[in-house]
Amino acid sequence: GAGVSQTPSNKVTEKGKYVELRCDPISGHTALYWYRQSLGQGPEFLIYFQGTGAADDSGLPNDRFFAVRPEGSVSTLKIQRTERGDSAVYLCASSPLGQSTDTQYFGPGTRLTVL
Amino acid sequence: GDSVTQMEGPVTLSEEAFLTINCTYTATGYPSLFWYVQYPGEGLQLLLKATKADDKGSNKGFEATYRKETTSFHLEKGSVQVSDSAVYFCALSSEASGSRLTFGEGTQLTVNP
């Protein structure tokens, strides 16, 4: 079956602009996660959705970052007033139930470059 | 909070050599432990996992045993191949931290023919 998909695969923007990154999880997975991976580092947690609600947004670095999942499926990560330090690969993952024993399935990522 | 420490890399081996990548963790409660792999140009994929103490995860000739007494989950393979060249990430997830994954920094493995 289809895996997790993310669009766009690459996004180049200018400092100060607004960007939206999209994630389409595996059908039927109730849990959806966003992570950010900087070069040479492991992924870092940003936010976790259980259904339509954000169960944990403690990883969002500041109020320029916001994410939604209005129908419990597709999610959008929104970044306002982008800064050069936001440049990274943004990863989305989904899991069946959001339990700690679940395998999280990752998408290919969106590489964001802020000039 | 939760944390994962991986051995420093990169690691370079010859084909058919024995591989160990060390991973230790700090967590509240009883986490589940994972090894993810990132092949060149590809996304993160699960290699193996263990969800309780003394469990052994295995896949593609790789193994790791959940050792609660030493808080470790070392990855091993008896005979590596060139196709095993990738970045390997140790990670944990716990109910106390809301099932998020906490990753180590990754270990770059290069296997030469």
Image (cartoon, grey):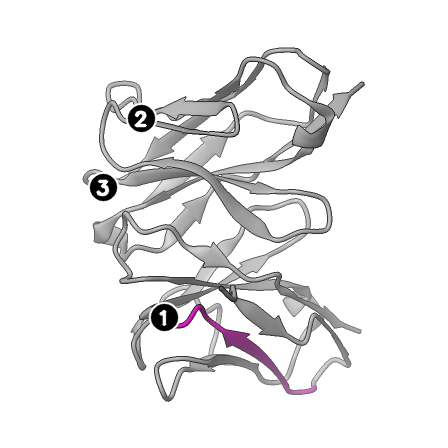
Residue for badge 2? B66
Q: Which mark is residue A57?
A: 1
Mark 3 and mark 1: span between their CA atoms? Answer: 19 Å
How far across and down, in percent of the image, does residue B4 sit? 42, 36
Is A64 displayed left or right of B63 in the figure? right
B11 lies above or below A24 = above
Amino acid type for the residue under numbered disc 2: Tyr
In the image, residue A32 above or below residue A75: above
Tag 3 secondary structure: loop
Q: In this view, does B42 lie to the left or right of B61?
A: right
C-beta proximity under 8 Å, tags 2 and 3: no
Q: Chain for mark 2? A: B
Q: How far apart are the alpha carbons under marks 2 and 3?
A: 15 Å
Horizontal side, residue A28 vs residue B103: left or right: left
The residue that label 3 is drawn on is B28
Give the CA distance from mark 2 to mark 1. 29 Å
Q: Do labels 2 and 1 share a chain?
A: no
Give the farthest residue toward the left: B29
Asked if the residue under mark 1 is in contact with the one under mark 2, i.e. CB atoms within 8 Å, the reply is: no
Which quadrant of the figure has residue B57? Answer: top left
Q: Are the two marked residues, 3 and 1, in contact with CB atoms closer than 8 angstroms?
A: no
Label 3: few (<14), some (14–19) or many (≥20) C-alpha neighbours in 10 Å = few
Seen at 38% across and 88% down, the residue is A70
Residue at horizontal 36 percent and vertical 66 percent from the top: A58
Whether residue B11 sits left or right of residue B37 in the image: it is: right
**Placement of the C terminus of chain A among the 4 image quadrants:** bottom right
- Start-end of magenta stretch: A17-27
Dot 2: element: loop
